[in-house]
Amino acid sequence: MGIVSRLQSWFNWLTTDPVGFIIYLIYFAASILLTLILHEIAHGYVAWQCGDPTAKMLGRLSMNPRKHLDPLGTLFLVFFGFGWAKPVPVNPRNFDNYRRDDFLVSIAGITVNITLFLLSLGLAVGLNSLLWKPEVIAMYGARQLLSSDGIGYAVLVGGAGGQNAQVMRTPWLQYVQRFLLMFGSMNLSVGLFNLLPIPPLDGYHIFNDILFRGRLRLNPNVFQIVQVALIVLCLSGGLSNILTTAFNAVEDAVLNLFLSIAGLS
């Protein structure tokens, strides 16, 4: 969905269901803040444990959004579904073991994002039977009530939950499940985006440490050119299609696994 169409969709939603839209914005903002902040704190904390106190001394182990949010990266997350925060400052000279510690610091944020995605989706699956009446689950299927393109998610995120209270066992749980689904999706998006082996993303450091044993070095000019190229790729839509395909594949696989474990498949 492009920026214009997304803004138009939000405007139409605001005019038809202002309460639902405001609730959505609150959850959306909370999901963005927590996803990006916890991602960066993970980098800083692991760096600290590996011998580099730079992030800690600069106050980057804080929940204060101003310490972490990058304006452009946050806008990308809002309008394109993937984005980034201010990179945590790291001084690799302080590492006890450069290659090992660089890998651990680089993968820390992604690990936190994927873990939060798994926990959020797992809890959302657990709440499904408590939220929806059995006949509704039997009619639509648990998967359609939980997947990001399914009926239940559209009802909840679309702000129509209050109109569908009669088909719910515990209507107030819709707000908990709505946040879990949104928070999980946000974490999966940020985690997958940062896995791309492109500077300055975490994936570049991860693949450099694994494939090149940390020997790959880019001079500042090349580094900046690659950063600009990354933004151009994001704006062109080609990268977005790749990430969307990967997102859907991972979400479907994990959701099917959780539903199977819960006996709802």
Image: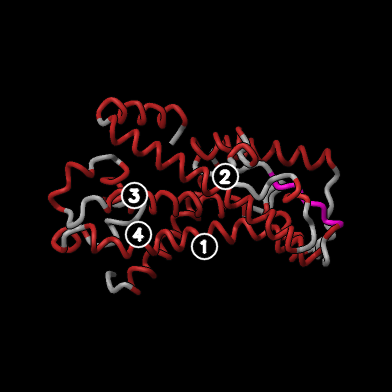
The C terminus: image quadrant: bottom left
Distance from disc 4 to disc 1, alpha carbons, whole Å, reads: 14 Å
Q: Looking at the image, is mark 1 or mark 2 earlier in the sequence?
A: 1
Q: Looking at the magenta stretch, what is its main secondary structure?
A: loop
Alpha-carbon neighbours of circle 2 within 10 Å: few (<14), some, or many (≥20)? some
Q: Residue at x 73, y 41 (%)?
A: 226
Residue occupied by mark 4: 124
Distance from disc 3 to disc 4, alpha carbons, whole Å, reads: 8 Å
> Bounds of the magenta span?
87-93
Residue 206 visible in rendering: no
| Magenta residue check for 63 | no
Which one is closest to the eye, mark 1 or mark 2? 1
Q: Nearer the viewer, residue 229 or 90?
A: 90
Q: Residue at x 76, y 48 (%)?
A: 57
**Res. 239 mark:** 2
Residue 112: x, y in percent? Answer: 57, 59
Q: Residue at x 63, y 47 (%)?
A: 62
Residue occupied by mark 3: 178
